[in-house]
Image: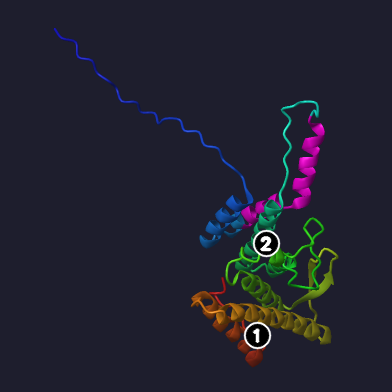
Amino acid sequence: YYLQATTTPSTTMPTMTATTTTTPLSHITKGDSLLIDGLYDAAIENYTTAICLTDTTTTTSSRAKKSSTNDSSNDDTTTTTTTDEDNKVLLLLRFRSFTHRSEAYLSKLKYSHAYNDARAALALMDEDNSTTPPPSLSSSSLLLLLPNKLRHGELALAHDRIARSSMGLFHSNMGIAARGKNGRVAFVKLMQGQMMEEGAEEMREEARRHWERALELVEEISSGGGGDTTAAALVSKYRNKLAQLDNDGGEQLDNDDT
């Protein structure tokens, strides 16, 4: 007799361990994917995490706390330092977190949230003089720090989002109630009468101001040559928005305004 050795194939998958790194960029990327899929709440959650991770006050205080608990006599103690380049990247990611979350709020028709997020993004650019940047951020303009890091039309899109938010508030009969020292704006439902007309007109003019600025920015890109079709398309879009404001006092938000 001969004994035949048999080998039973394993039915278990090999264990694979992966290190999950939580970074602002990873949350922005995931948020963008969720936004495209229409999962707005999940997208907002990821953008919010990215905003928290780019809060320089939080990261600085965390490093200081960690440093204070280290034994200075231990030669193995390492000190984490943040370079100017690191701060520039944090500012850029913070800008994108705010403006992309603004888009997500627009998709949910939460115009006041979208408005404030767009303003927070523009504050980093010194693009809105009436907005005071949060104290946790550098006083330097992101435009000066990262002139070559922004995508073409990226700043214009932030202005477009605050303009669309303003028109959403306009059509919802909402007006500005108060402006906080941190740059955030509170809104209130407008009552019938002169106050309603004045408040609504303020929101419409806010939209005009930001669409005009958006148009100015993309016209600068378009005039620079290079065949930038995105800039040319945005020029046409913002001109149409302003024409609609002049013709009928402001249109409802288009379905393709995403």
Quadrant of the rendered image containing residue 42: bottom right
Q: Is residue 163 above or below residue 48?
A: below
Please state which of residues 221 and 41 is positioned toward the viewer in this rendering: 221
Q: Position of residue 6 (x, y in %)?
A: 24, 18
Do we see residue 192 in this rendering? no
- Name which residue lies at 63% across and 57% down: 44
Q: Position of residue 92 (x, y in %)?
A: 66, 59
Please give the range of residues in magenta: 44-70
Do we see residue 10 in this rendering? yes
Residue highlighted by disc 1: 250
The furthest residue to the left: 1
Residue highlighted by disc 2: 95
Q: Check residue 51 for magenta coloring.
A: yes
Amino acid type shown at disc 2: Phe
Q: Position of residue 200 (x, y in %)?
A: 75, 82
Q: Is residue 242 above or below residue 8?
A: below
Mark 2 and mark 1: Cα distance apart in space: 28 Å
Secondary structure under tag 1 reads loop
**Can you tell which of label 2 and label 1 is closer to the viewer?**
2
